[in-house]
Image: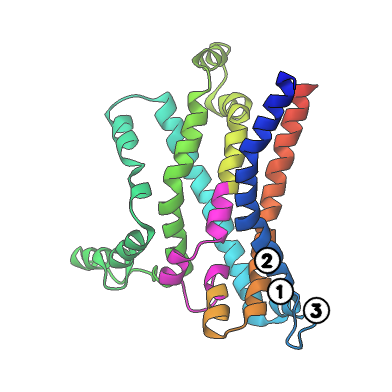
Amino acid sequence: MSKPVKMGILGLVLVIPSFLLLFVTVVVPIFVSLKESLTNEEGGYDLSNYKFLFTDKLMRANIVFTLEVTVISVVIVLIVSYVLAAYMRFNKGRLVAWIRNMYMIPMFIPSVIATYGLIQLLGNHGWLSRWVLLLGGGDIPRIIFDIKGIIIAQLWFNIPFTTMLLGSAMSGVPDAVIESAKDVGAGRLRLFVRFILPLTYKTLLVAVTFVFMGVIGSFTAPFLLGPNAPQMLGVSMEQIFGVFQEKQQASALAFFTFMLCSVMGYFYIRSMIKDEGARSA
């Protein structure tokens, strides 16, 4: 047996366990959920559960609310993280060192503890409200049990990881490129559009994908900080399955959420394939 064949068999043997784990934990549950979502109350198969998602007024509101929270969170996370990453990459000093030492801390705080901390800080009788009253201010707008509370929690959870990703990409931008662009008179805006953004585009797309999937499938923060109605899809799914015992409708909602994430994953994979094709050419 030739060496290339042996290496090919060895590679296949090493890949099979990971493939089987992926198949059992991801592929099989997806098909089970799809089958369950197509099952009606009589035991037959139709689209009645998906019809419920788009005809029920409350479910439509939940879908719109989830997409609204997701889009707003993704946009703000990317803006803040990109600014932080760029500032740490192209500046020096005590403030930069302080940011480097502090911005990762939220990643090491469990989500439940962080969520309850936000409730204590931003609630109607929380620390922020008390300080505002002590300083002579009035009542602050409602933040907890509102869309604003969920978005603030998503920023807390996602900005550190996204900043880390973008910071890694920024570190790969050569100083020589930046200095050369400055020498020929490129301003900050042109420097960003023509050099920094193209060189960090791939990592930016990865960050968008991870943040989108993380926010749209989140449960802890929306459950503890969100309003009773409308709800994000993760909370709504738990209510349908755990409270109303509607397994088929919960499966339809789960598969619909998976399809939303798949759309984002499709654009990411398509972009990667195009880049690889351009390199090969």
Label 2: element kind: helix
Determine the CA span between mark 3 and mark 1: 9 Å
Q: Is residue 83 visible?
A: no
Rendering coords of residue 181 (x, y %): 57, 15
Q: Which residue is mark 1?
A: 37
Other-residue count near label 1 (Cα within 10 Å), few / some / many at <14 / 14–19 / ≥20: many
User: Which amino acid does the dot numbered 1 rest on?
Assistant: Ser
Q: Main secondary structure of the magenta part?
A: helix
Point out the stretch of residues depicted in magenta.
Answer: 210-236
> Mark number for residue 47?
none
Instruction: Assess whether mark 1 and mark 2 are in contact (beta carbons under 8 angstroms).
Output: yes
Residue displayed at 66% across by 78% down: 249
User: Which amino acid does the dot numbered 3 rest on?
Assistant: Tyr
Determine the CA span between mark 3 and mark 2: 15 Å
Other-residue count near label 2 (Cα within 10 Å), few / some / many at <14 / 14–19 / ≥20: many
Rendering coords of residue 275 (x, y %): 72, 30
Instruction: Tell me the quarter of the image containing the C terminus.
Output: top right
Is 277 displayed left or right of 208 in the figure?
right
Q: Which residue is mark 2?
A: 255
Q: Which residue is mark 3?
A: 45
Mark closer to the chain start, 3 or 2: 3
76, above or below 199, in the image: below
